[in-house]
Structures are given as structure tokens and as C-alpha cells.
Image (spheres, helix red, strand yellow):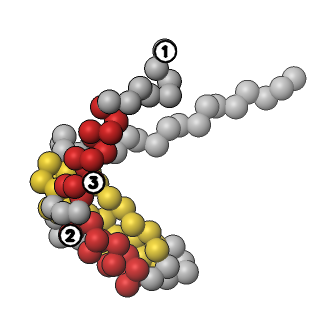
Amino acid sequence: MPSERAAPTPAPAEPLPPAGLADVRIVTASPETARRVAEVLRHCFDSTEQRSYPAGREGGTRLHLTVDTTHPAEPARSWLVASRASVAGRPRHDDV
């Protein structure tokens, strides 16, 4: 007689950030690498102060910040405008 297994309980859903904001989590082996990635994001978007936490037993770093995609700076502004224009005029792969 096969044993019945309970379905795994899904992890509680994290609250979604308000429209236009994106929560970003960076996980690296080095705190310096995490800071570099966060710095690039801050050059492209308005953001909150980063929060840093240990990640794993090996000494990695987990860094969190929230970026505001409604206020992009260069170079993100140019990229966003160009990507919107090219996507708008092109049919999608799954369009029938």
C-alpha cells in the first residue's frame, strides 16, 4: 500500500514592492563584489540604502536594496527607451 505524502507547504509569498519599485538581492562570495554590483544599480536607478547580511557558512555576502525604476538615470534611461521602442514594433514569438 503506497504511503500518502502530504504536499509540501509552499513558502509564504513575500509582499510585492509598490509598482515601479524592484527589490534586488545580490549574493556573492565577496562583500566587495556585492558593493560593486549595487553601485552600478545606483548609477542607473534611484535606490534605497543597501542592507548587507552574511550569506551561508562560507562567509558570503547577501546585499539587499530597492531600486525605483520610474526614475532611471543614464545609462538605464537610454536602454529602457530603446528597448521599449524596439519591442513595441516587433511581434512576439508567442503571438499568433
Residue 82 image point, x, y percent: 27, 47
- Picture residue at 30% right of the left edge, 31% below the top: 88
Q: Quadrant of the N terminus?
A: top right
- Horizontal side, residue 56 vs residue 7: left or right: left
Q: Residue furthest right?
A: 1
Query: Where is residue 57, by image quadrant?
Result: bottom right
Camera-nearest label, 2 or 3: 3
Res 94 seen here = yes
Q: Which mark is residue 65?
A: none
Q: CA distance from mark 2 to mark 1?
A: 39 Å
Q: For the residue marked with disc 1, what is the amino acid?
A: Val
Q: Residue 43's mark?
A: 2
Mark 3 lies on a secondary structure that is: helix
Instruction: Judge by depth and name the residue closer to the eye, 78 or 50.
Output: 78
Extreme residue in the top direction? 96
Mark 2–mark 3 CB contact (< 8 Å):
no
On screen, residue 24 versus residue 67, left or right, reads right
Residue type marked 3: Trp
Label 2 element class = helix
Residue of label 3:
79
Helix or strand or loop: what does disc 1 sit on?
loop
- According to the picture, the residue beneath numbered tag 1 turns out to be 96
Look at 19% across and 40% down and name the residue there: 19
Q: Amino acid at mark 2?
A: His
Q: Is residue 21 visible?
A: no
Which mark is first along the chain, 1 or 2? 2
